[in-house]
Image: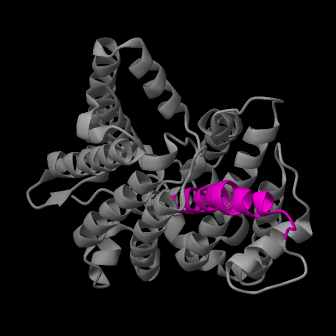
Amino acid sequence: MTHVAPGRADAGLSVGTHAHRGRWRAPALLTTLGLLLVAGMVSSAGVGQLTVSVTEVVGAALQGLGWQTAWAPDSDVTYQALWQIRFPRVAMSLAVGAALAVAGAVMQAIFGNPLAEPGVVGVSAGAALGAALAIVSGGVFAGVLGTAGLAFAGGVGATLLVYFMARAQGRTEVVTLLLTGIAVNAFAGAGLALVIFIGDSAAREQIVFWQLGSLNGSRWNEVAVVVALSIVAGAVAFAFARHYDLLALGERTAGHLGLRVERLRVVSIIVVAVLTGAAVAFAGIIAFVGLVVPHAVRMMVGPAHRMLLAGSLLGGATLMVWADLLARTAVTGAELPIGLLTSLIGGPFFFWLLRRARSKQGGWA
């Protein structure tokens, strides 16, 4: 018997029932998010120990792209600080937020539940274990790229392990996938605890700091890796937007309409693994972005996935840019871990979602 996740039937009805709502809300939302994103990028680049005016930020960006303007900073120190420190960090926050939010939207589509998020399939726990192994072992894995490489491999590997362990008789059930993800998360958590136990004090501190999440020290080569992986995986997600709409009608109905549900689920899980793995490899564990942003966007524009994915992309990027700015400036002389900050924001929102889902009896929006 084909299992239909709670809320799946309601989701199918919502696609048609609320389509008119998205027609006028979607452009307004995308425009608003775009303006907030630009404002956040300029503010984040200009605010810090070295204060840079808006005109100098814009001038430096244009000059770096080959356009000479009168707004360019007079000081070479300011120009280099923007292009070597501030701009890479802003770009990384944008890429990480967009990747996590799109991954969350895809997860909620294939699980048929707005409370699903990328960590369900073990990618975050696997990435944490991979990063911890790299930090403790050192050697060829020493440094940011080595840690990020093992973190990415651990995240993707854990996700594939969840899928193949949950697969039976040529297909996977959503409930089985969820329960397998819980088991793999627990196993990875135990492995992480063991690695922390056998590591020295310096390694333990580094592992804990990595888990809290930070965009400090982002470099252009790292940004290029995250952006490249996110573009490829994100393009696949957008190509399947119509398929996710069909899946919202229920697996059996979608199958009758010609949708190959199992193939869609396999590809989607790989997309989630790549998006989330790329994001957390360089930024550490960033909680709740993949849960909060897609659900908030869905409440505003409805469940049609083309607009939902676009809104999630912009919403995730906007949230991370502003969260990183707050993390850098909230405490004088110190920087809050951005994962801690997103958890402080996302935790209460998640509780509200649970209360709302209960009152709606598991409905989407």
Question: Is residue 91 or residue 9 the one in the foreground?
Answer: 91
Provide residue 270's location: percent of width, then percent of height. 30, 62
Provide residue 65's location: percent of width, then percent of height. 67, 81
Quadrant position of the N terminus in the picture: bottom left
Question: Is residue 31 or residue 295 the one in the foreground?
Answer: 31
Q: Quadrant of residue 257?
A: bottom left
The prevailing secondary structure element of the residues shown in magenta is: helix
Provide residue 125's location: percent of width, then percent of height. 37, 36
Residue drawn at (67%, 63%), measured in percent from left and top?
83
Question: Is residue 188 or residue 150 the one in the foreground?
Answer: 150
Provide residue 344's location: percent of width, then percent of height. 69, 33
Is 55 a magenta residue?
A: no
Give the left or right position of residue 346, taking residue 3 as reference: right
Write the start and end of the magenta stretch as one range.
73-99
Residue 117 can be seen, yes or no: no
Q: Quadrant of residue 260?
A: bottom left
Residue drawn at (69%, 71%), measured in percent from left and top?
301
Q: Quadrant of residue 44?
A: bottom right
Residue drawn at (25%, 53%), measured in percent from left and top?
173
